[in-house]
Amino acid sequence: MTEQYIVSTNYGQVQGVKADNYVAFKGIPFAAPPVGKLRFKPPANPEGWTGIKVCDTYGPIEPRPLNAIGGVVGGGAEAPCSEDCLYLNIYTPNPDGKKRPVLFNIHGGAFQTGDHSLNSDPEGTTAMDCILITASYRLGVLGFLQIDRYLGDEYIESGNLGMLDIIKALEWVHDNIEGFGGDPERITVAGQSAGAKMASALLLAKKAKGLFSAVMLDSGATSALRDMHTAQEIAEKYAVAYAITKENAREKLLVAPWETLMNYQGVLFAGASLQNLGPVFDGVNFDGTDALEIIRSGKANYVTILGGYNRDEYSSLMAYYPMKSIEDLVGYFGRNTPYIMSVLEKYHIEGDMKRLVAIISRYFYGFPCIDMFDAFAEANKGNAMYLYRFDWDCGGAGAGHTLCSGIASGVVGKQSPDIALLPGYDSVYKQSSGMWNSFVKNQNPNTPELPEWPTYNKESRLAMFIDAESHIGEIEHTDPNISTQTLRL
């Protein structure tokens, strides 16, 4: 007789399916479908059910534009796109009531694409006796368009819906994970790229307090948050393309099919436009409008942090977010663009691409991460922090965006076996996966494969430089002439 894996949740019973070394519960609804009257509204509780819900199939994944990075549905998930997309997946060694560490992975994709399968490894996570959870959240204009100017104050949170979806999923996990063999007091939120930016926003979000005990951030910090002026200006750009006015906004935004809304989203993602969507200081979800000040003032969520960036981030982003002129830097730096241009004034994009890669990698990824760590250190709340920079030169292509988390999670080695044959890969994989796994299990990245890794403080700024032979050293100081936090146009 085949063993049945049935768990009771706050909304009804669910039944999982056995894989090689874990039990998977796929497509569990953590919120009501955000359709009809709930479009552009914060997530609501899911409806309960009677009987047993067999969770053997992934729920639909998030809508995205036809020309999004990675294709129409992207990422390889076994599911169609649908506006009804708020589902999570649980992979557990055994739903036996044992309190295991939990890894909650937020996928990347520039807040416009990607899906729950990105940079997640159910087999590897469960093999170390931990639970993996992945979830979908609203993307693009359905998740991050600040439309209150057109639909009124009841839509003031419209720029944060994707973040609120993740918070809703975390609430569900915190309340129900014990039945799946997990510990609600040992939940680590991990994210790469947009996922890291989302996790950084959770460090500031009021509603996220107490829902997790640690975060792992790869290539993303609080700099993705936008002020209201910037968010509304970006929404106006979309409104012009879609011919939205206050008079027709309800029909255009609330009634039209999601495919129509997505068809006009391309105007927001042409060229160097990586920051056009993401969380917003909306006056509701955050205690302030400046990320670093929220952290310093004691109003953030002070948990254990492992975070870092890749030395050559922009080297692998150029194809997706190309620059035709230096003026395109406004898509990355907003009001900081004149200063960044002055840093580059003696260099031309065509003539010194390495210089451009270095500047964007530092000012867009590196310095925001260091600034955030400095602010947490100044807050002096006692939360341990571990900073790294990933330096391994992948076959001469540099240490590009997504490389560290891709290698650490094992996804790069499986999906790109040619990279796994490069000199130094085995060493880098053992070190990065070791720190990743140790942090999930122990909320400390120290492993025998790495030098002793001290916690971060602003005085010494010691960080781990990950390479074939990793070492501890002082991270470069940030630029005192500008603040890299919060995108402002």
Image (cartoon, rainbow, N blue to C red):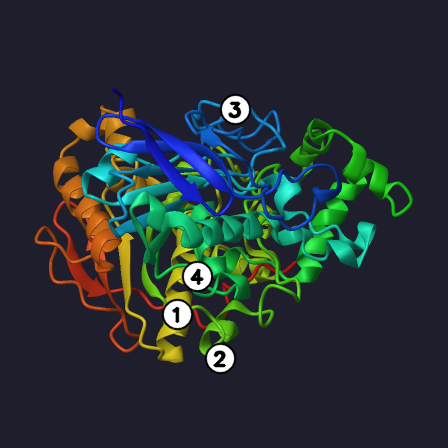
Pointer 3 with pointer 1, Cβ within 8 A = no
Q: Is residue 37 left or right of residue 437?
A: right
User: How far is disc 4 from disc 3 in space, using C-alphas?
Assistant: 30 Å
Q: Dot 3: few (<14), some (14–19), or many (≥20) neighbours within 10 Å?
A: some
Q: Is residue 210 left or right of residue 73?
A: left
Pointer 3 with pointer 2, Cβ within 8 A = no
Q: Where residue 92 sits: x, y (%)?
A: 29, 39
* Residue position marked by numbered label 1 in the rendering: 302
User: How far is disc 4 from disc 2 in space, using C-alphas?
Assistant: 18 Å
* In front: label 4 or label 2: 2
Q: Would you place residue 387 above or below residue 40 in this image?
A: below
Pointer 1 with pointer 4, Cβ within 8 A = no
Q: Residue furthest top?
A: 1
* In front: label 4 or label 3: 3
Q: Amino acid at mark 3?
A: Gly
Tell me the SS state at disc 4. Answer: helix
Residue visible at 61% across and 41% down in the picture: 32
* Residue position marked by numbered label 3 in the rendering: 71
Q: Where residue 488 sits: x, y (%)?
A: 62, 60
Q: Amino acid at mark 4?
A: Pro
